[in-house]
Amino acid sequence: MPETIPEELTALRGVGNSLRERLQRLGVHRPVDLLFLLPQRYEDRTRLTPLGAVVPGRRVVVRGEVALSEVVYRRRRSLLCRLADGTGQITLRFFYFSKAQQEGLARGRRLVCFGEARVGPGGLEMVHPEYRVLAAEEPVALEQSLTPVYPTTEGLQQFRLRNLIAQALDRFLPLLPDWLPAAATAGYPALRDALAYLHRPPPGADLAQLAAGTHPCQRRLALEELLAHHLSLRRLREHGRRESAVALPPADALRRKFFGQLGFTLTAGQRQSLAEIDADLALPHPMMRLVQGDVGCGKTVVAAAAALRAVAHGHQVAVMAPTELLTEQHRRSFQRWFEPLGIGTVWLSGSLSRRERQAAYEAIGSGRGQVIIGTHALFQEGLEYRSLALLVVDEQHRFGVHQRLALMQKGAAGDTRPHQLVMTATPIPRTLAMTMYADLDTSLIRELPPGRQPVQTVALPDRRRPELVARVREAAGAGQRAYWVCPLIEDSEALDYQAAESTHAMLAEALPELAVGLVHGRMKPDEKDKVMRAFAAGAVQVLVATTVIEVGVDVPEATLMIVENAERMGLAQLHQLRGRVGRGTGASSCVLVYHSPLSEIARQRLEVLRQTSDGFEVAQRDLELRGPGEVLGTRQTGMLQLRVADLSRDAALLPAVQDMARELFASSSQAVESLIRRWIGEGSRYGNV
Ligand code: ADP
Ligand code: MG
């Protein structure tokens, strides 16, 4: 037996080139990866279930004698076999069957079957179970452990994968090194034991616990997986520190002019964040900083002030936002602020004509364009910056870590990289942020600008919708504006969503004296922008929208936010939507419209929003309530492809993860590299840095 696990998949018996290719599609590049390819679920073939004890929805092994076998022609021709064992009976239903099969299933035969029991027209049944006809006196051969069901790919059968993993377990598991500090894993099963257990749980293992992902063996692996991600992010940061960037000295004169024309003064949080940014920018290494601050706290102006430091010294700034709508808004803000200072802004929009785009590219290439605003179009093929020194990424949670780093690479010129300023309005509890944004330094803006009135939040059943129409009329009469948000754009009976299009029609009819606009995700960007602009200018007073307006849109005159189907949305998303109002000085309200009856979790969510308007509090409660993936957002967890761990469920592991990371960085670079390689793979999913 070798001392270490071989690197080549072909070291496994039966693996040639074509199988290797299929395994690679599953992310299995080395034999050791098979050990970490964990079952999605399990089947229990370790015991016989008496027919009398079969419960619908369970997949079970049953044995019995065929009491009746007949072909029926109700809606579809099918073969029905009644199986009985003295404790009860079940019907086996086959829609596809051969003559031979039919004869094999004749009355009096003894069978063993595996399948999912469900309630059929004539009682319990199994549709197309796996079965075997037993010879006289033949005992049923049961499995010794639960049967794992692995994620697989086309052309790779489950049994083949099982055999390969079994081979890997037998040959290589004993050689698998455990890199975690012993003290940190004292309360957990050993790594090898955990893997052995999860691939082959013994009869009687707690399937519900395994399905929930809370088994101690899963927690042991989750700990290691979270650690690996944390290490890879920290390593990125270490690398970043060693890279070079253009040091950007102060730009006091320009800053003074900028602040002088702003019309307001920065809040303490804004000033503090800017000071932290300034300290980073002065260094010849790329800044990697996250500014976290609730919706409306004024992150844009901080980014603009930061941009001045690049511009003042002849460099360029790219400002990237996730939607056209947001880039349009940034364009307006930056133009308003920068034009009087003689700074040239360029907007790279998908709606530019070919000629306009060409002109924009030229402005960027020549350096005339000093601040460039756009979506990821900012990094399109063929676009060359003259001297990009700062990249601002707004609403970070819409972009994955991976995407962000890829952009930073593209922004690199020679061996210098742009400074990076990332802004997010999604508040993240501290330990989560420290672990999952470990590649970034964090600044926090806790307060909103003065003069804002808290948004009054109420929840209302949808049968009281007519009252809302009156409220919209009232708001518009007072010169204010209203959002009416619906989750989907077309009526979908199945989902029973209140669709934006029908709401728009309803409101247009009920409020003929008002202009009612509509924006949704399927509109062309320029159509969307036109409506948004009309809303911002007041030509449209009521804006019906899907959740495309979720992030960042800033219309201070909007004072009423109505959200349909609020019970179906996550806390973070609702909080974001609410943040669209309360941006001016007028009193604002947010009405969460729900469809009765409310589930308990939905009721609690709405209650949290009624109780607090602090985004960090909302995030904390969200974590406790565990609306799936809401804290980091499904989108956000999408950026980390976790196999065992779940950031919300396993949040309690994070402090230990940080301690371990510190220890390993200090003591063993081999452990660091090996863990990253084991869980994240070659070159890391975060870009090859
Ligand atoms: P967000 O942090 O959600 O991106 P914005 O940057 O869009 O917030 O700012 C929201 C609004 O608050 C904008 O209209 C902005 O001009 C205004 N604003 C920002 N900072 C201040 C401040 N210190 N005092 C008053 N208004 C401010
Ligand atoms: Mg913003």
Image (cartoon, rainbow, N blue to C red):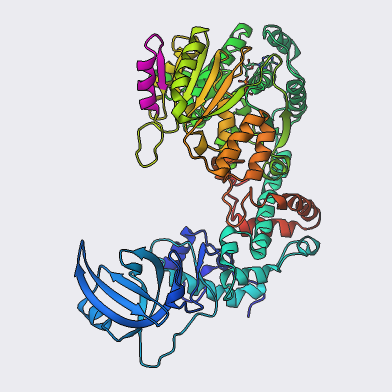
Tell me if residue 19 comes above or below residue 529 in the rendering: below
Point out residue 482 in the picture as x, y percentages from the top left corner. 50, 17
- On the question of residue 410 being in view, the answer is no
- On the rendered image, what quadrant is the N terminus found in? bottom right
Counting labels gives 0
Q: Quadrant of residue 458?
A: top right
Pick out the residue farthest to the bottom. Answer: 137
Task: State which quadrant residue 251 falls in.
Answer: top right
Q: Is residue 492 above or below residue 348?
A: below
Q: Quadrant of the C terminus?
A: top right
- In the rendered structure, the answer to whether residue 399 lies left or right of residue 306 reads left
**The magenta stretch spans which residues?**
500-518
Find out whether residue 438 is within the magenta segment. no
Horizontal side of 500 relative to 338 (left or right) equals left
**Frontmost residue, 83 versus 187:** 83
Q: From the viewer's side, name the closer residue of 413 and 14.
A: 14
Q: Quadrant of ligand 1?
A: top right
Instruction: Kindly identify the residue that appears in the image at 47 percent across and 79 percent down.
Output: 48
Q: Estimate the x, y position of residue 402 in percent, counting from the top left.
A: 57, 42
Q: Position of residue 198 (x, y in %)?
A: 59, 68
As drawn, 540 above or below 645: above
Name which residue lies at 57% across and 70% down. 199
Left/right placement of residue 384 relative to residue 267 reads left
Q: Position of residue 517 (x, y in %)?
A: 41, 17
Looking at the image, can residue 101 be seen?
A: yes
The outermost residue toward the left is 73
**Above-or-below relation of 554 to 575:** above
Camera-side residue: 561 or 90?
Answer: 90
Quarter residue 109 falls in: bottom left
